[in-house]
C-alpha cells in the first residue's frame, strides 16, 4: 500500500479551489493509502513570521474545513507540523547533506521571492528559513518515508528535490532506508476565481467553504459572464462565459449543463436568473459540509482533541523512524 503525506500551509479558512483541487482528492485517497495530512505551520512562518496573531485560529480553521469535507481522523492521520518536533530534527540532518545550489535553483522559491519583493517594495531579503523551504518539505515527507505525494503541479519541483535528497542520503550513509517518493498528480479541474483569474484568498475572488448560503449567492451574482451580452434575450455564448458557465460545468450534471447551454444560446435565459440557479446549486452541494463545519466550530475542544491525538499518532511513527535515522547517521 502506498504511504502518502501531504500538507497545506495554515492560511485560515479554505476556498472552493482547495476543496475541488486538493481536499476532495485526499478524502478519496484516505481509503486507498496509508495517509498523513498535516497543517504546515512552520512553512507558513517562512513568509509570515511577523504575522502570528491569527496563527492558532488559522490552523484550527484549516482542520475544521478538512473534517467538514470528509477527512476522517479514524481513517487518516491529521496533525500539525510543529506538534511533531521530530520533523525539525530531521530537517537539520537533511540540511547538512543538501548542496546550497539545489535550494537556490528551486523555481517555487524563486516565485515566492518575487512575490515577497513586490510586496515589500525592495530587493527583499530572503531569510534563512525560506531558503530552507524545500529541505523542510523534504523532512515532512521523509519523516514518514512516504512513497507518494499528492500535490498540485506547482509543487512537483519540490518533490524532485526531495527525491534528490533521499537518494543522496542513501548514498552517503550507504543505506536504502529512504524511498524516493513520487508525485501523485490529480486530474481534477481547476476552478477559477469569480473574476476569471486563479482563485485565491489574496485576490478576493474566492468562495469559502465556510461562506454562508447568502454570501455565496451574492458572490456568484458578481461572477463574470458573456461580456458581449447586453440584454437578457440576446443569444449568449456559453463558451465565452468565462466564469458562470465554467462553474456550471464543474457543479452541474450533464443534463443541467446542456439545458443552460441551449437556453443561453437561444436567448431564453438571462444571466441574473442563470446565476441565481447556479448559486442555489452550489449551496445545495455544500450544505452538508457547512452544517458539519458549524458543528466543529461550536466544538473547538473536539477539534483540538483530534489535532492532539492525530499529532501524537504521527509522532509515534516519526519517533521510530528518527531513532533509526540517527542510528544510520551514527549519532550518539
Ligand atoms: N509547500 C506546500 C504548499 O504550499 C505545502 C507542503 C509543505 C507540503 N510540506 C509538504 C505538501 C509536504 C506536500 C508534502 O502547498
Ligand atoms: Fe453565462 Fe448563464 Fe449568462 Fe449564458 S445565461 S452567459 S451561461 S451566465
Image (tube, rainbow, N blue to C red):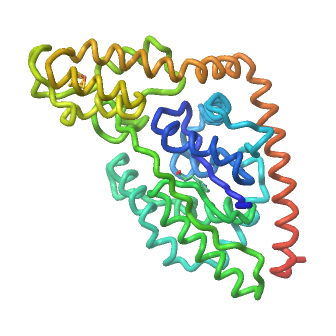
Residue at 53 percent of width and 65 percent of height: 158
- Position of residue 158 relative to residue 329, above or below, is above
Q: Position of residue 149 (x, y in %)?
A: 61, 59
The answer to whether 37 appears left or right of 266 in the picture is right
The answer to whether 309 appears left or right of 150 in the picture is right
Residue at 71 percent of width and 16 percent of height: 298
Dividing the picture into quarters, in which one does residue 300 lie? top right
Q: Quadrant of the N terminus?
A: bottom right
- Position of residue 304 relative to residue 326, above or below, is above
Q: Position of residue 218 (x, y in %)?
A: 36, 15
Q: Quadrant of the C terminus?
A: bottom right
Q: Position of residue 208 (x, y in %)?
A: 48, 27
Quadrant of ligand 2: it is top left
Q: Position of residue 34 (x, y in %)?
A: 75, 53
Q: Which one is nearer the viewer's eye here, 330 or 222?
A: 222
Residue at 44 percent of width and 59 percent of height: 125
Residue at 76 percent of width and 46 percent of height: 77
Report the residue that reaches farthest toward the front: 255
Q: Can the viewer see residue 56 in this picture? A: no
Q: How many marks?
A: 0
Report the residue that reaches farthest toward the right: 332
Q: Can the viewer see residue 270 in this picture? A: yes
The answer to whether 126 appears left or right of 257 in the picture is right
Q: Which one is nearer the viewer's eye here, 248 or 312?
A: 248
Amino acid at each position: 500500500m502506498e504511504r502518502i503525506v501531504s500538507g497545506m500551509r495554515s492560511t485560515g479558512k479554505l476556498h472552493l479551489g482547495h476543496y475541488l483541487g486538493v481536499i476532495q482528492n485526499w478524502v478519496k485517497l484516505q481509503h486507498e493509502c496509508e495517509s498523513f495530512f498535516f497543517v504546515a505551520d512552520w512553512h507558513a512562518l517562512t513568509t509570515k513570521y511577523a504575522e502570528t496573531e491569527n496563527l492558532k485560529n488559522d490552523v484550527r480553521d484549516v482542520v475544521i474545513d478538512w473534517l467538514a469535507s470528509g477527512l476522517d481522523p479514524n481513517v487518516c492521520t491529521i496533525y500539525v507540523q510543529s506538534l511533531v518536533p521530530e520533523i525539525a530534527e530531521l530537517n537539520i540532518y537533511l540540511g547538512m547533506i543538501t548542496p546550497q545550489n539545489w535550494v537556490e535553483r528551486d523555481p517555487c522559491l524563486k516565485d515566492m521571492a518575487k512575490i515577497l519583493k513586490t510586496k515589500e517594495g525592495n530587493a527583499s531579503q530572503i531569510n534563512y528559513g525560506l531558503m530552507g523551504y524545500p529541505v523542510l518539505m523534504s523532512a515532512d515527507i521523509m519523516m514518514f518515508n512516504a512513497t507518494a505525494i499528492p500535490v498540485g503541479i506547482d509543487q512537483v519541483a519540490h518533490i524532485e528535490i526531495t527525491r534528490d535528497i533521499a537518494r543522496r542520503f542513501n548514498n552517503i550513509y550507504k543505506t536504502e532506508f529512504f524511498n524516493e517518493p513520487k508525485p501523485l498528480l490529480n486530474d481534477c479541474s481547476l476552478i477559477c476565481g469569480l473574476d476569471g483569474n486563479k482563485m485565491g484568498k489574496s485576490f478576493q475572488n474566492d468562495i469559502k467553504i465556510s461562506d454562508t448560503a447568502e454570501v455565496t449567492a451574492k458572490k456568484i451574482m458578481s461572477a463574470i459572464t458573456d461580456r458581449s451580452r447586453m440584454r437578457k434575450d440576446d443569444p449568449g455564448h456559453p463558451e465565452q462565459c468565462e466564469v458562470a458557465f465554467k462553474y456550471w460545468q464543474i457543479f452541474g450534471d450533464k443534463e443541467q449543463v446542456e439545458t443552460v447551454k441551449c437556453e443561453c444560446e437561444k436567448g431564453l435565459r438571462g444571466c441574473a436568473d442563470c446565476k441565481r440557479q447556479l448559486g442555489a446549486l452550489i449551496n445545495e452541494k455544500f450544505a452538508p459540509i457547512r452544517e458539519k463545519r458549524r458543528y466543529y466550530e461550536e466544538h473547538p475542544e473536539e477539534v483540538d482533541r483530534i489535532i492532539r491525538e492525530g499529532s501524537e499518532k504521527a509522532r509515534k511513527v516519526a519517533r521510530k523512524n528518527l531513532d533509526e535515522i540517527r542510528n544510520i547517521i551514527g549519532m550518539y
